[in-house]
Amino acid sequence: MKKSFIFALLLRGFASLIIEVLLIRELLVTFSG
């Protein structure tokens, strides 16, 4: 039970989620004009 390993996984998932949301927002802004 390595807490640092679990924390790293959570942080990575959170970061990827934020990046995905930002990319989707950029695409929406680009396509909506």
Image (cartoon, helix red, strand yellow):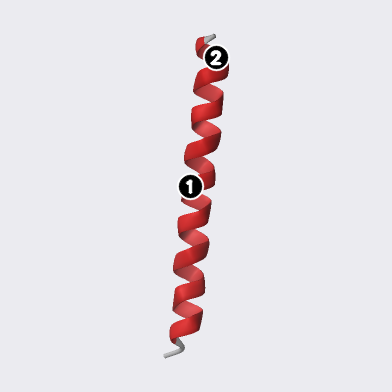
For label 1, the crowd category at 10 Å Cα-Cα, with few meaning under 14, some 14 to 19 and many 20 or more, is: few
Labelled disc at residue 30: none
x%, y% of residue 19?
54, 45
* Residue at mark 1 to residue at mark 2: CA–CA distance: 20 Å
Report the residue at 55% width, 14% height from top. 31
Secondary structure state at the residue bearing disc 2:
helix
x%, y% of residue 2?
46, 88
Q: In the picture shown, does residue 31 fall above or below 12?
A: above
Q: In the picture shown, does residue 4 fall above or below 30?
A: below
Name the residue that disc number 2 marks: 31
Report the residue at 51% width, 72% height from top. 8
Labelled disc at residue 18: 1
Give the mark nearest the N terminus, 1 or 2: 1
Report the residue at 47% width, 39% height from top. 21
Query: Which callout, 1 or 2, points to the residue nearer the camera?
Result: 1
For label 2, the crowd category at 10 Å Cα-Cα, with few meaning under 14, some 14 to 19 and many 20 or more, is: few
Secondary structure state at the residue bearing disc 1:
helix
Q: In the picture shown, does residue 15 fall above or below 7?
A: above
Q: Report the amino acid beneath label 1.
A: Ile
Q: Report the amino acid beneath label 2.
A: Phe
Q: How many marks?
A: 2
Q: Residue furthest top?
A: 33
Report the residue at 55% width, 27% height from top. 26
Query: Marks 2 and 1: in contact by CB < 8 Å?
Result: no
Q: Quadrant of the N terminus?
A: bottom left
Q: In the picture shown, does residue 12 fall above or below 23?
A: below
Q: Quadrant of the C terminus?
A: top right
